[in-house]
Image (cartoon, rainbow, N blue to C red):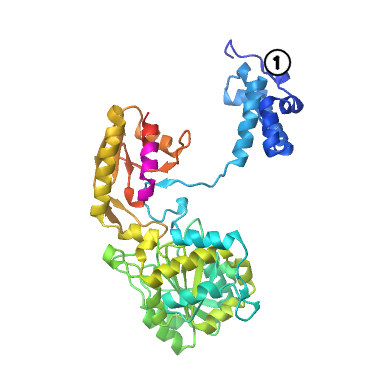
Amino acid sequence: MPPHSASRAALLRRIPSVDELLARPLLVTLREKVGHELVRDAARDVLAALRTELGTETAARTKRSVEPHSVEIEEVERRVAAEVEGWLHPSLGPVINATGVILHTNLGRAPLSPDALDQIREAAAGYSNLEYDLAAGKRGKRDVHAARLLARVTGAEAAIVVNNNAAAVFLVLHALAHNAEVIVSRGELIEIGDGFRIPDIMAASGARLREVGTTNRTRLADYARAIGPETRLLLRVHPSNFRITGFAGRPSLDELVALGREHDLPVYEDLGSGCLTDLSSAGIDEPVVRASCQAGAAVVSFSGDKLLGGPQAGIIAGKKEVIERIRRNPLFRALRVDKLTIAALEATLRAYLRGALDDVPALRMIRLPVETIRRRAEEFVARLAKASGSLAEWETIEGQSVIGGGSTPGESLPTWPVAVRSARHSAAALEERLRRPSGAHKPVVARIEDNRLVLDLRTVFESEESALAAAIIAALE
């Protein structure tokens, strides 16, 4: 033990009591602001943690020297105040996404439009007609609000909304094929993220999986041979997070629908990413929901917070009779969304109806011309190089952005990121300083390439550039 460290036993005896702490000036003021119980509980937690830190077994295991000042009442008082502040400070907060990943699952996927935020505020601030039919003066259904817009933009006869696409898949299978067989190609038994796998969801729903074909090739005849008296559904899953290339193939949706009609079986297509508009002009090849509905799929499902660009939701659309059957399933109530999700979804869908795709932030980022990004990057570098002086070296480089969120695998968008080398900090240290800023700076999430910090402005809102610049200058110092 270092000579300046006191014995642990002596330090344990010097730990103040809860009552001593609560009488301290800082904590008295804090109790007046937030209440006695919260400060008291924080004091108890801090003292318990301090005793654990000073415990012989713990200290010996961590080989940590214990300093006398750690039990001084002023230091413990500060720790209690910090503990209270930690409880009261939001854990969920905004970050600047400079990764170039547009639908970054870990960063909340699609950012919402100003219109969506305004409608959320209106719906949340008071009462609403969520389940009240104003024209009839009686109880209504919450799903009517988004349903009429979804039917318009997808071409479906009806639609309902649940809390995410995994829930949508589960509900459709439970409602249409519980205790019965669902035929699906082996090449479509995908994992859709965070360990959720189609076979697992099917098993939980009570549907029995009937695999056909092979991993890389499934023919229409494979489906036809598998149809039997227990078959209730033909399932087609869009591989939205991977691609099989080379000697591969599967029947078209038109062919599968024709087979389903021949045997009086509905076809269900899980589209995953929920693309509502043709993005081929941006170099993105994703099936459009309307095309699946027009091809005759009885039901389709997709996410609300991926390529659709709205809030987290699972959307189920299709034939009116089929959707009504799904809606009557008791699990629908357990999986339905709240008024805030409906408000944000409505606002997002109205942008599609207006043809205002750039009003949807995710779509605007996808469609952003590469020359626009390059111009912004060059102006940003000029600004930062002047402000940072000798603290860093700056340049713009060619790069690639990605859609992310389990969408468009293998496809990328050309971009011009900003690369920076710090004179004082390694790229890893600079990345951490941006991610865990001191003071009031907003956290920035970036990436590292070739021992340089790389910032892709494609996913940075122009309104965030000043905050990004300030955060970088602070991290460089």
For the residue marked with disc 1, what is the amino acid?
Ala
Image coordinates for residue 399, horizontal then vertical, percent: 27, 49
Is residue 462 found inside the magenta-colored segment of the image?
yes
Q: Which residues are magenta?
A: 460-470
- What residue sits 45% from the left and 36% below the top? 437
Residue 81 appears left or right of 215 = right
Residue 405 appears left or right of 37 = left
Name of the residue lying farthest toward the top: 3
Residue 367: quadrant of the picture: bottom left
- What residue sits 42% from the left and 65% below the top? 308
Image coordinates for residue 192, horizontal then vertical, percent: 46, 61
Vertical side of 331 occupied by 293: above or below: below
Count residues near mark 1 (Cα–Cα under 10 Å), then give few for <14, some for 14-19, many for 20+: few
Image coordinates for residue 155, horizontal then vertical, percent: 42, 79
Vertical side of 245 occupied by 295: above or below: below
- What residue sits 58% from the left and 80% below the top? 325
Q: In terms of depth relative to the viewer, which is nearer, 281 or 113? A: 113
Asked if residue 208 can be seen in this view, the reply is no
Quadrant (top left/top right/bottom left/bottom right) for the C terminus:
top left
Specify the principal SS of the magenta part: helix
- What residue sits 33% from the left and 59% below the top? 366
Quadrant (top left/top right/bottom left/bottom right) for the N terminus:
top right
Q: In terms of depth relative to the viewer, which is nearer, 198 or 52? A: 52
Q: Give the residue pinned by disc 1.
A: 10
Image coordinates for residue 112, horizontal then vertical, percent: 45, 58
Element type where label 1 sits in the image: helix
